[in-house]
Image (cartoon, rainbow, N blue to C red):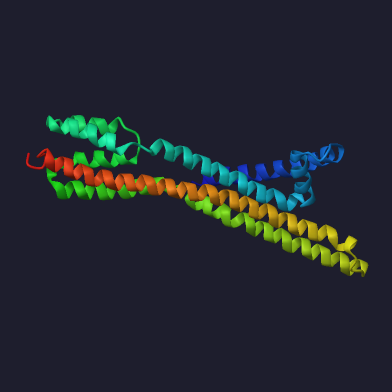
Amino acid sequence: MRKLVTLLLVLVISAYNGLVAFAQDAAAETAAEGPGGYQLIKKYFIDGDPVWMAPVLLCLILGLAFCIERIITLNIASANTDKLLERINDELKTGNLDGAMEVCKATQGPAASTLYEGLKNAKDGPEAVEKAIVSYGSVQMGLLERGLVWISLFIALAPMLGFLGTVIGMIQAFDKIEAVGDISPTVVAGGIKVALLTTVFGLISAIILQLFYNYIISKIDSITGSMEDASIGIMDILAANNIFKK
């Protein structure tokens, strides 16, 4: 565990240094090239001070990485439970409990894994099946929600880092006012610009991650609903095929 944390810290520090270096290298390119869309983004990134913009961008990149991983995993976990129950019912009509279990083993997703645990305890009665489904279903729910806490962290962290840059920018503006002894717009414009840009980038990052987060939550709710329907359906199928009486 300690090695994993150390590796993660090294990756984060390396990514941060890379982002700062990218921003510094891009400054010359932005000055030389026209104000295209990509160049405009780079310009604002540099104007907002890479020291404060890079952590916000890092939160966005890491948050998107977790979101993409969850979306891919959940899409793989999604299964047509109606067809799965039909195949299980076909096997149980002939009394082939082992065949029904093999159908579950051959199907990807938490619903199939949960039904497999229920079928494995079918000979012990309906209470054992229900207990196995509830227990293993809770385990599968934990697996579905894995990584969400990190996405929530980056959603909260990105705007906070942006606001931190805002405060630092305002402090810089007041420092210049104190040093110059003048409140002219040219004196405070730089600090205020940094303040506004870091806030904007922090909020944009949080909005993007929030959209992905809500989609992931809705996907988990859909899979959970399918698992609950499948759990009720398997009890009816086992009872209809007199598996409990054997």
Q: Is residue 14 above or below residue 199?
A: above
In terms of depth relative to the viewer, which is nearer, 174 or 238? Answer: 238
Answer left or right for 85 relative to 170.
Answer: left
Is 21 in front, or is 206? Answer: 206
Please state the horizontal and vertical placement of residue 161, each as a whole percent of the image.
66, 57
Q: Is residue 3 visible?
A: no
Residue 208 location, x and y as percent? 59, 48
Residue 16 appears left or right of 151: right
- Name the foreground residue: 167 vs 211: 211
Q: Position of residue 167 (x, y in %)?
A: 73, 64
The quadrant where residue 101 appears? top left
Q: Residue at x 12, y 29 (%)?
A: 94
Left or right of 100 on screen, residue 65: right
Q: Residue furthest left?
A: 245
Q: What residue is drawn where x is 32% and y is 44%?
A: 226
Question: Picture quarter containing residue 122?
Answer: top left
The residue shown at (43%, 49%) is 218
Quadrant into which the C terminus falls:
top left
At horizontal 75% and vertical 47% (from top left) the residue drawn is 45
Residue 240 percent coordinates (x, y) = 12, 41
214 vs 41, left or right, is left
**Residue 241 can be seen in this image:** yes
How many marks are shown on the rendered structure? 0
